[in-house]
Amino acid sequence: MEKTFAVIPVSKFTDAKTRLSPKLTPLERENLLKSMLKDVIGVLSGLVDNIIVISSDDDVLNFVKKLGVETFKEKGVTDLNGALTQAIQHYSNFCCNVFIVPSDVPLIKKDHVKEILNRSQEFDVVIAPSKGGGTNALLCPTSFCVKFGDYSFFEHIDEAKLRGLSHSIYDSFYLSLDVNTAEDLGEIMLHGKGTEARDYLKKVQLKVKSNHGSERLDVSREATI
């Protein structure tokens, strides 16, 4: 039976989500990333043959060891695709496919993972796009060349075509959300019931309301007495 390993790349905790700095302190951003990471790992658990977190940050690797997943430390100075390639090559002797999921997709659900894995019975590559044209989940053979970055959704489609691999697009509102802006925090508040991420945002007293301006959602801190 072909094995599928999930791979989750994670940046340094100290660099976590700087674009959220108008709404969250550095410690809050770090804790949010930890919460989202726990959400992603929790959803993947039991559905794939192994879960590996890759990072250059010892704090990240020590944190996830407590969550019962395998860790892989990046070697040397590299970018996201270089780090992913290191991990994929390392584990290629143990699995046939990798399921790459970012750490900041807290609305991912077990049904999403099951449906993507089911599609792999018919297609060589399954790609879930992000709202901005990136890739929020990629199921592919270990021989596939990953191309994460701006507009990587289209890059991955082109790569599949170039290699003569069949591909399927898995389009999901929930899975398309990766957290970068204050409005994304609002989406977690609205749609993330039962997630660690939403629980944490409520803990730090964020609130969301509909907005008719340039952004659909207004996220603010609840007033304290």
Image: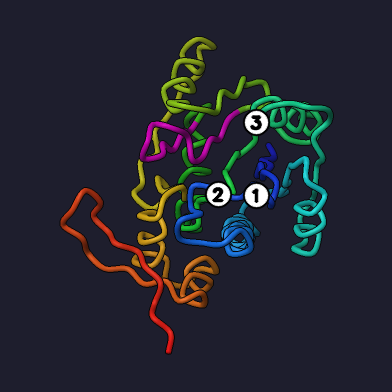
Q: Which residues are magenta?
A: 126-140
Q: Is residue 139 covered in magenta? A: yes
Residue reaching furthest top?
A: 162
* Secondary structure under the numbered disc 3 in the rendered image: helix
- Snapshot quadrant of residue 146: top right
* Residue 80 disc label: 3
Left or right of 118: which side holds 50? right
Horizontal side of residue 83 vs 209, given as left or right: right
Main SS category, magenta section: strand
Quadrant of the image containing the N terminus: top right
Q: Earlier in the sequence, mark 3 or mark 2?
A: 2
Kindly identify the residue that appears in the image at 76 percent across and 33 percent down. Answer: 87
Q: Position of residue 19 (x, y in %)?
A: 49, 47
Nearest to the observer: residue 224 or residue 98 = 224
Amino acid at the residue labelled 3: Leu
* Type of the residue with mark 1: Val
Circle 2 residue: 17
Q: Earlier in the sequence, mark 3 or mark 1?
A: 1
In the depicted structure, whether residue 177 falls above or below residue 145: below
Q: CA distance from mark 3 to mark 2?
A: 16 Å
